[in-house]
Structure formats: C-alpha cells, structure tokens
Amino acid sequence: MHAKKAREANYLFSYIRSSLQWKLILMISCIVILVVVTIGSFSYYKSARAIESDAQRFSNQILKQATLNLTRYINDNEQFFQTLVISQDFQDWTRINQGDTYRNYSKLKDMENRIINPYISFHKETLSIVLYNENGNQIVYRNETRDAVLETEYSFAASNMKDKITDTGRIQSFVNLRADYKNSNGQKIQLPILTYVQKLYYSDQPVYLAVDISLMPTQQILNEIELGRNGQALITTAEGNVISAPDLHMINTKLAHPMMEAMKKNPSGYMYNQDHTQMIVYQSIPKVDWRVIVFVPYEDLAQRIIEIRNWTIAIASLSLLSAIVLVYLVSHSITKRIKLLRRTISTTKLGRFDIRPDVKGTDEVADLAESYNLLLDRIDASIHLLAESKMVQQQAVLSALQSQINSHFLYNALESINAMANLAGHQQIRKSTIALSNMLRYTSNYKDSLVTLEEEIRHIRDYIQIMDNLYPNELTFHFDIDPEVAQSACLKACIQPFVENCIKHGYEMTGENLQVRISAYQWENDYIRVDIVDDGSGISLGKLSEIREALSQVRPEQEFLQLLRIGMLNVHYRLKTFYPHHAHAGIMVERVSDKGGTQVSVIFPNQVKE
C-alpha cells in the first residue's frame, strides 16, 4: 500500500515537473496563498493593534475637550492674578504699615469693587485671596458664596507656603489637600485646592500674593468626556495624587507607583495595563504639571477588532478563490501557445525547417515565436549560403592548385627564354623575361596578402619594364614616393591594375604618347593615398558616374568571387573587406581636367607591416 502511494506520488510529481502549466498554477497559487496568509496575519496584527488607533482617537478627544478647557481655565486664573498684581490698589497696599487697620480694609474694598468682584462673578471657584507683607501686614478676601470658606485664624506666615516659594519673581502654582477650610456648618474639611503664589518687591520688604482656587470645576470638564460605557477619566498631580475624578471617593487617593513612573518618561502617550485589561491614555498640562488620564477597558474596543477580523477572513477567502481561477485561465493562455512552440521545436530537431509555429498575440510568447520563425528563416538561408560557399571554396582550391602547376611551368619556360636571350645577346628580351618572372612570383604567392608599399612599387616597376620594351619611347613614368610611407603595409596587387588601365585606355586606344605619374603620401593623418594620374584622353562624365555608382554599392562575397578580372571593383571590394572599420579605405576616380586625363586614388590605413 505504501509502495503504491509512493509510486502515485512520484508519478504526480514527475507530471507536474514536466508540465509548465501545472508549475505555473502551483507556483502562482502558492504565491497567492502566501499573500493572503500574510495579509490575513497582518490584518489580525493590525486588528490587535487597533487599540492603539482608538487610544490615539481618545487622546485627541481629550486634547480637544479636556486639555483645552483646562488650559483656558488656568489661563483665566493667571490673567486675573496678573491683573491684581499690577493694579495700583495692590501697589498702594504694599506701602501700608502694620496695624493700619483702616487703610487695610479700605484698600481691600477698593480691590474688591474694581477687580475681585467682577472676576468672581464669572469664576465662582475662586475661594480666597491672601495679601501678605513681610512687615506682618496681612489681609484676606473670602468668597462667602461658596460652601468652603477659609478659616478666620489662617495665617500665611504660619503656613508652609513660604518655604515652597522660590525667589524667581514668577507666578508659581501648587496643588494641595488643604485642611484650613470650613463648610457652612463650621466644620473643617479637606479640599484639593490650586494655589497661585508670587513673591513681589514693591518696597524693602517682600510681598506675597496667594489665590486659592477650587478644583471642583474640573469635575465638570471630566464629565463631558465620553469614553464608552465603562471608561473613566482622572486628573492627577505629577506624583500620582488624584485631584479630580467622576467618583468623588477617588479624590485624594494615589495611583500605582509603576504607572506614574511610566508616565514621567513622556508627557503624553498610552500604555496597556495587563492586570486590569485596560488601555491607559494620558496627556500632560505643563502649566500646573497635571496629568489627564483616561482608562479604557479592552472590551469596549474588542468589538471593532472582531469586525475587522471577520471582514478580513471573508475578503481573503473570496480573493483566494478568484485568484486561483484567474491563475488557471492565465496559465492556460500562456502554456497553450508555448506547447505549440514546443512541438515546432521538436520537429526542428528532426530536421524539418519548413514548419512554422502560428502563435497569436502581442506579448512575449508571440515575440518569442516570431523570433523563432525568423531564426528558422535565417538557418534555412544559411544552409543554402553554406552550400554555395562550399562550392566556391572547392573551385578556389582547384584554381589555386592549377595556378601552382601553371606557375611552375611558366617559371621553367621563362628561365629557358632568359637563357636563350642571354646566349643570343638580346638584352631587351632578357630584361622583359626577368621582369615577367618577378611579377609571376609576386602575384602567385597567395599566402601573403599584405606587402610593403615599397614591394608593391617594385612590382609596378617590373610591369613598366615589360611595357617599355613593348612600346619603346612612347610611355613615360614618374614616381614620387614619400620615404616615410615606403615601409607601410599595403594590400598586394592593389596599384598595378590601375597603371595597366592607364596604358590600356590611355595609350592602346589612342596610340598617342602617354605620361603616367605615381605618387604616394600620407593623407588625413591616418591614411596613405596613392594617386595614379595619366594625361590620356580622359574618361567621360557618363562613364565616371557609372563607375562611382558601382563603387558606392556593397557587393556580396559570392558576387565578388565571380569577378574573374582583377579590376577596379575587385580592388575596391578587397580594400573595403580588409579594412572594414576605416570609412575612407577604397578607390576614388576623378577627371584631371575638362581636356583629358584621369586620376585614380588608392586609399588605405597607414599601418606598419609586421
């Protein structure tokens, strides 16, 4: 049973390995599954971290509803404090001596009428105002409209407030649980009170101004914050003492020390309490160093996480199903054409180059099939070209062997003629025979395609020797060869054919005396130019245009091999083929003047023969 299952598994594995379609289906399906799982995991992770988003939302809400209100509340108190400090009545009071009861009372009434009462009418949370001079003079304003009234025996000098004040000249604030207030029944009570104090100098003795403000109005600000069904908000001091809370029993209690230590690291933020499964969001109020703290139970936020999780699972499942269907359709579209191309390639391996895959489309697979069809066309053309090249090569080898046989025979015959001319005393025949022998040896050595320019000129002189004997006193030749280019590399037999053309077309057709000038010099820095100029009848404009048109055309190798004569096109093609990267290499033909004369220029790179 196990062996059968193993064979089935191996067969399935082999089938998948041999099928591109199933490879694509499995590969893309794995990628899709991986993506879906990744997205699902990430969504679950983000859902689990949705508490952070909600904490940020609650934090922003606190900043808008609580912090702004509390800051405005504190700013109003500080503005009232400053108004009182800079008032003329307060400054006049600082100059009153101790024991002047009438003036104390009078200035207090003036301050009440002008400053204190207008402010108290809108800010009833102000409980008392204490003015104290180091000379012992003290007056106290008490807000009688409140249930909490400062006791009559209160002494600023006896309190510990002076010890907390630093001599900075700035307003300082303190939050304390004060026990020096009494209710309407005359009983002492403890209240969380915000005290503003400033130490001033208007005379030789320092003067203190203290304003006590009830923190109970902050309770209204906290009640306006909506934090879900079970959430609650608190205001604490930096030390963790609760100074305001919806539950009045929590006032004067203290938060856990680790929680407050964590809040000291950042002025605002959030944390998660594992013990009580709740999110804690807090914001600092720098002016009084308070903390506005929000406690949000996890269960109030879990409902959003569950909704996100359910939507993620539903979307991921639908996406996975749609992706698998699309994968199958796309892979089938691609592999169907690849299979067709594969079958064509298989027939090509059997030697069938006439079958072409008909693949439709404009994508990469269609481009591949089109390129393969082009490759088959080129292979087919190359096969025919190779067959033709083999035939030409065989003909060239046979011609070379025959040339060697003919050359050997000619050498022996010329040597015999030379010997007989020498015995008979015919020096002209002897010189012509030697020159012809040199020319045959020069041209029949097909192993060296490059010679020096000096060797090429020597070959021309041998030819001229023969022509002088053939046409005595009718041909004149002049050489002007720059010594600096004499040892430069030159393609063999590329100049002599044009000297021969000068005699053939310039003398033999007219019978008139002919002068030929051959000059070689450096041209355009990188080239050598050899000019062959005659003073014959010249070339017609029509013939010149025809020759230039033929020189401008690119001829294939097979057509060149069919050029049996070593003529102008032959030399031009050899130069272009031998120097493919030199644009100026080749032949140029010009008329010397309107009266006659022809100039043929052979141009090739200035290179030293190794």
Image (cartoon, rainbow, N blue to C red):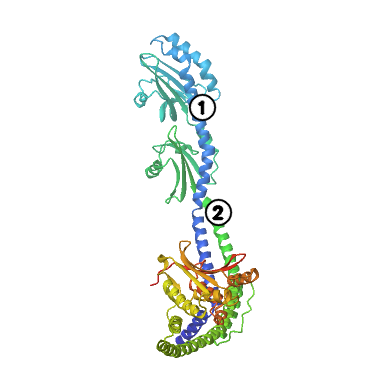
Left or right: 570, with 103 as reference point: right
Residue 226 visible, this angle: yes
Q: Amino acid at mark 1?
A: Asp
The answer for how far apart the CA atoms under marks 1 and 2 are is 40 Å
Residue 268 sits in which quadrant?
Answer: top left
Q: Amino acid at mark 2?
A: Arg
As helix, strand or loop, the secondary structure at mark 2 comes to: helix
Residue, far front: 425
Examine the rendered structure and indicate whether residue 128 appears above or below residue 531.
above
Which of the pair 600/3 is nearer the observer? 600
Examine the rendered structure and indicate whether residue 535 appears above or below residue 395.
above
Please state the horizontal and vertical placement of residue 115, each as a whole percent of the image: 52, 18
- How packed mark 2 is, by other alpha carbons closer than 10 Å (few <14, some 14-19, many 20 or more), is some
Residue 603 visible, this angle: no
Examine the rendered structure and indicate whether residue 531 appears above or below residue 280.
below
User: Can you tell which mark lies on residue 76?
Assistant: 1
Please state the horizontal and vertical placement of residue 327, each as a whole percent of the image: 58, 71
Please state the horizontal and vertical placement of residue 87, each as a whole percent of the image: 48, 16
Left or right: 293, with 507 as reference point: left
User: Can you tell which mark lies on residue 456?
Assistant: none
Precedes in sequence: disc 1 or disc 2: 1
At horizontal 49% and vertical 89% (from top left) the residue drawn is 398
**Mark 1–mark 2 CB contact (< 8 Å):** no
Please state the horizontal and vertical placement of residue 492, each as a whole percent of the image: 46, 76
Which of the pair 371/168 is nearer the observer? 371
Examine the rendered structure and indicate whether residue 285 appears above or below residue 125.
below
Q: Which residue is mark 2?
A: 304
